[in-house]
Image (cartoon, rainbow, N blue to C red):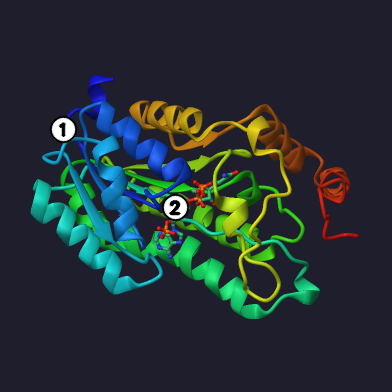
Amino acid sequence: MEYFKDKVIIVTGASSGIGLASARLFGSLGAKVVMAARRLDKLMELAPSVADEDHVLCVKCDVSSEEDCKALVEAAVERFGGLDILVNNAGLSMRAMFKDLDLKVIHSLMDVNFWGTVNCTKYALPYLLERKGQVVGVISIAGYSALPARTGYSSSKYAIRGFLDTIRIEHLKDGLNVLVFAPGYTSSNVRNAALTADGSAQGETPLDEGKLMSAEKCAKHLAKALRKRKSECILTGLGKATVLAHRLFPRLTDKLTYKFIAREANSPFK
Ligand SMILES: NC(=O)c1ccc[n+]([C@@H]2O[C@H](COP(=O)([O-])OP(=O)(O)OC[C@H]3O[C@@H](n4cnc5c(N)ncnc54)[C@H](OP(=O)(O)O)[C@@H]3O)[C@@H](O)[C@H]2O)c1
């Protein structure tokens, strides 16, 4: 895809999963990739698999910190002279019923997922506008149709969608492309890292990760949606069906979602 050649792309959450697979794909297509995450050592270890040293920059960044996000954008622009695409991918999940939940869990999810996207977009926007660039929010099907035991996750993903849909209209005449990208279940570390009721990591996944979409395939969908300058991309058959059903038959979808989650290993309903 010639489209990405020499484009400067920031990917947050590039140390694992969908972010890492996307960084690698952009790197293989000739982009200048800025990899951001909290674990700088991990990024440095992975950077050679993304691009040669002239085409990759690793930046330690906790996206919940406005200062870190400002510094991330400044480092990208200083190193590569501008910015074409911001991929707000860094994210954190959870799994616990709201009645049992320490509210710090919802604060953490909003800080990373929602505020991380707002922080990075705020500082990247002037540079993106200079190049008629693109901003992406990696949300989830849970950002269209709520998932029980993921109050903080669904809320944060709905909020990102509202934020980005608004930015799109504000810049409708400026050439900015705003993409809401919603993967379905994708194999990654997200469920291991998900927070439980007391804020500790779940440390296991209730799903058979081998049966899910691979992060590499998800990254290919992201690249295609960016190349076509789409404003929305919803993945997987189940994901598309869920979003449509939620729009057309919301109460029936509530019941089906309840049944679906009740069948999960260690279901929170049990
Ligand atoms: N996998 C799925 O089934 C699925 C489905 C729909 C949507 N998504 C979304 O896809 C995105 C990527 O998730 P994934 O599945 O690839 O999960 P993952 O393998 O757990 O990767 C999450 C990434 O986010 C980074 N991160 C976490 N907290 C951060 C923070 N405070 N600041 C900066 N970086 C942070 C992690 O790096 P460090 O720990 O090094 O900071 C890691 O690189 C998330 O937004 C997730 O909600 C995933």
Query: Looking at the figure, which quarter contains the N terminus?
Result: top left
Inspect this view and state whether residue 85 appears.
no
User: Residue at 76% across / 37% down in the picture?
Assistant: 245
Q: Which residue, given by chain and number where applicable, does mark 1 sit on?
A: 6
Q: Who is closer to the viewer here, 23 or 249?
A: 23
Where does the image place residue 26, in percent across and percent down from the top left? 30, 33
Q: Is residue 263 left or right of residue 207?
A: right
Check contact, mark 1 vs mark 2: CB within 8 A: no
Residue at 26%, 55% in the rendered image: 125
Mark 2 crowdedness (10 Å alpha carbons): few <14, some 14-19, many ≥20: many
Comes first in the chain, label 1 or label 2: 1
Tag 2, which secondary structure? helix
What's the residue at 41%, 69% (across, down)? 64
Quadrant of the rendering where the C terminus is positioned: bottom right
* Depicted 120 relative to depicted 245: above or below: below
Residue type of the residue flagged with mark 2: Leu
Disc number placed over residue 174 in the picture, else none: none
Question: In which quadrant of the rendered view does residue 131 lie?
Answer: top left
- For disc 2, the marked residue is 164
Q: Is residue 257 above or below residue 231?
A: below
Does residue 138 show up? yes
